[in-house]
Image (cartoon, grey):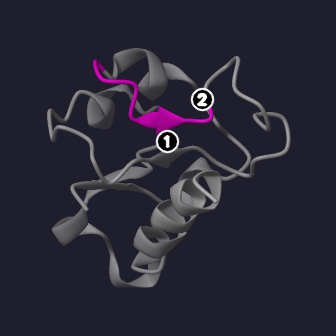
Amino acid sequence: MAYVIAEPCIGTKDMACVDACPVDAIHPGKHDRGVETAPQLYINADCIDCGNCIPACPVSAIFAGEDLPDKWKHYAQINRDWYADRTK
């Protein structure tokens, strides 16, 4: 996984990262089903690794997978699971 959205996004869900992503790899977006109830935003593991989302995030919730703090390592799986649940 290239990038991971972690705990600082919970409850914030600022859409600046969604707008900065050139390949629509961050969801749920403003018009996606479930945006109101999702606790955070998620990055698809198939993102193109451009990094545009990192400076766009006002709460510093986005990390390169290898830079994810130990206390938030489990968010890599949380991001993967969110997308896996959408394909079932």
Quadrant housing residue 41: top right
Decide which of 22, 72 is in the foreground and name it: 22
34 vs 24: above or below: below
**Going 61% across and 25% down the picture, which residue do you hit?**
29
The local crowd at label 2, few if under 14, some if 14 to 19, many if 20 or more residues have their Cα within 10 Å, is: some
The vertical placement of 65 against 36, above or below, is below
Q: Helix, strand or loop at disc 2?
A: loop
Helix or strand or loop: what does disc 1 sit on? loop
In the shown orientation, is residue 36 left or right of residue 35?
right
Residue with the most extreme front position: 88
Residue, disc 2 = 14
Say which amino acid is labelled 2. Answer: Asp
Picture quadrant of residue 19: top left
Q: Are marks 1 and 2 in contact (CB under 8 Å)?
A: yes
Q: Position of residue 22 (x, y in %)?
A: 28, 18
Q: Quadrant of the C terminus?
A: bottom right
Residue 13 belongs to the span the image colors magenta? no
Q: Which residue is mark 1?
A: 59
Above/below status of 51 relative to 60: above
Q: Which circle, 1 or 2, is nearer the viewer?
A: 2
| Region of the chain picked out in magenta, as a range | 22-28
- Please, what is the three-letter code of the amino acid marked with disc 1? Val
* In-image side of 68 versus 66 (left or right): right
The residue sitting at 23% across, 27% down in the picture is 52
What is the x, y in percent for residue 15? Answer: 56, 24
Q: Residue 9, position in %: x, y? A: 58, 48
Mark 1 crowd level (few <14, some 14–19, many ≥20, 10 Å Cα) = some
Magenta part, dominant SS: loop
Q: What is the spatial separation of the Cα atoms under label 1 and label 2, in whole angstroms?
A: 8 Å
Name the residue at 60% across, 29% down: 14
